[in-house]
Image: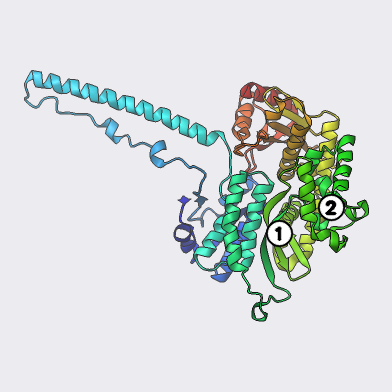
Amino acid sequence: MFVSDFRKEFYELVQSQRVLLFVASDVDALCACKILQALFHCDHVQYTLVPVSGWQELETAFLEHKEQIKLLIKQDDDLEVPAYDDIFRDEEEDEEQSENDSDGSEPSEKRTRLEEEIVEQTMKRRQKREWEARRRDILFDYEQYEYHGTSSAMVMFDLAWMMSKDLNDMLWWAIVGLTDQWVQDKITQMKYVTDVGILQRHVSRHNHRNEDEENTLSVDCTRISFEYDLRLVLYQHWSLHDSLCNTSYTAARFKLWSVHGQKRLQEFLADMGLPLKQVKQKFQSMDISLKENLREMIEESANKFGMKDMRMQTFSIHFGFKHKFLASDVVFATMSLMESPEKDSSGTDHFIQALDSLSRSNLDKLYLGLELAKKQLQATQQTIASCLCTNLVISQGPFLYCSLMEGTPDVMLFSKPASLSLLSRQLLKSFVCSTKNRRCKLLPLVMAAPLSTEQGTVTVVGIPPETDGSDRKNFFGRAFEKAAESTSSRTLHNHFDLSVIELKAEDRSKFLDALVSLLS
């Protein structure tokens, strides 16, 4: 069933039941799960948590418990779900025919009535054809693209707020869920800014303190604040130099894969007047005098180098006086824990570790996630540099194509869907900044990476064009289905993100040929 009122149609129904909670393997879903867990704990609701990484695991878990499942919900938010009357039609009226042909009326009256009925039936048939044409258009528009609505964590926080059970921790999880959508380019900049405004009001409400002794914060308290901070990944837990080199925004605009790009970076640092010794040591160890005005200095120099969006609206959290994290720091750390390349641990172990890292009592796991995220970001930028320098990104006509080969350094890091999607988006941004071909700047990207050498499979992901006015709608999910169907390619459409599929390496050529033909 579709749910519009989460309090009445969902929470009040399950409050007295044992709940089976299916949670997908992405950061927003983890944050929504944490909020629900807190609510269930508050109301003593029993629940079972089942992590699911794709449709197959969801189906298996559902079949295992189907005898007990009474309610399966889907959020009905701003995803433009078509209205019932636009898709379904009651046929009873069409089947009703007038049977009053012999009622003793005069032949002339019968003839007139028959003519009226013929006209009426003709009008009905015309209206039905128009309705069917409109239905086809609506379903085509709805099914053709994949796009995202409001963050699940924000929806769950809104539920907690309506029930007056919202806490600062829940608010932070909602912020991390929204930031995950922004980091992964799932929503537009306008949607992000709008939702940030909504959360900012909650932050003011939860974190308002007067500056007097009576209201001072305890040492181990949690404090969330709105920030207009730098668009640099993990810079407060890294060196400023490493952060500049591994942030997709700065790496793409400086073109750091080239010698000229490295020189531009040195010019940028010189323009700010920052010594290399300071820039290359940990941010926390930099001179306090430099750190005080660092954001303004970087923004001023960035404007000179054509980077107008060097700062962004975000939030930070303080755990006492020692630990401070930006929302994007937590997103990258949690994502890296969830898609950790460790072979000794199972997917469920990674899921639990990522879920635990969101709790303030497990800061050691969050710091471990930050270290993994640094390695992931470095591997991403090194792979992008390799792809661009060796011209691995080629035009296939209606789209760009890039394939990572077996033996590429860190290639197994990118066999997971979120990691490969992040690499693909950043590669497309860098390619758009580097190419002089205007047509190629407007093309989407299809990228493939080895998944299993034993099974001979690759992971394929489709990324929409990188344009300023992009509505973040992805059409590759439907296109992949049709291309596989028309060529009998052996594919597995198991991921919740429809633009990510698994494909037999042997079928790659005919699959790509069909995709080119389909999108031309």
- Residue located at (47% from left, 61% from top): 7
Q: Nearer the viewer, residue 500 or 146?
A: 146
Taking 174 as reference, is 294 left or right?
right
- Residue located at (34% from left, 28% from top): 128
Q: In this view, does 45 lie above or below 402?
A: below
Query: Can residue 238 be seen here?
Result: yes
Per the image, the residue denoted by label 1 is: 352
Q: Which of 27 and 204 is in front in this view?
A: 204
How many marks the image carries: the answer is 2
Residue type of the residue flagged with mark 2: Leu
Q: Can you tell which of label 1 and label 2 is closer to the viewer? A: 2
For mark 2, does the 10 Å Cα neighbourhood hold few (<14), some (14 to 19), or many (20 or more) residues? many
| Percent position of residue 230, x then y | 74, 52
Q: In which quarter of the image is the C terminus?
A: top right
Task: Name the disc covering residue 240, or none.
Answer: 2
| Percent position of residue 64, x then y | 58, 53
| Percent position of residue 15, x then y | 50, 65
Q: Is mark 2 on a helix, strand or loop?
A: helix
Task: Name the disc covering residue 246, or none.
Answer: none
- Residue located at (18% from left, 20% from top): 115
Query: Can residue 51 be seen here?
Result: no
Q: In this view, does 116 lie above or below 474?
A: above
Residue 9 falls in which quadrant of the image? bottom left
State how the image is colored: rainbow
Taking 47 as reference, is 119 left or right?
left
Q: Which of 345 and 27 is in front in this view?
A: 27
Q: Is residue 48 above or below residue 464?
A: below
Q: Is mark 1 on a helix, strand or loop?
A: helix
Between the residue at mark 1 and the residue at mark 2, the CA separation in whole angstroms equals 31 Å
Residue type of the residue flagged with mark 1: Ile
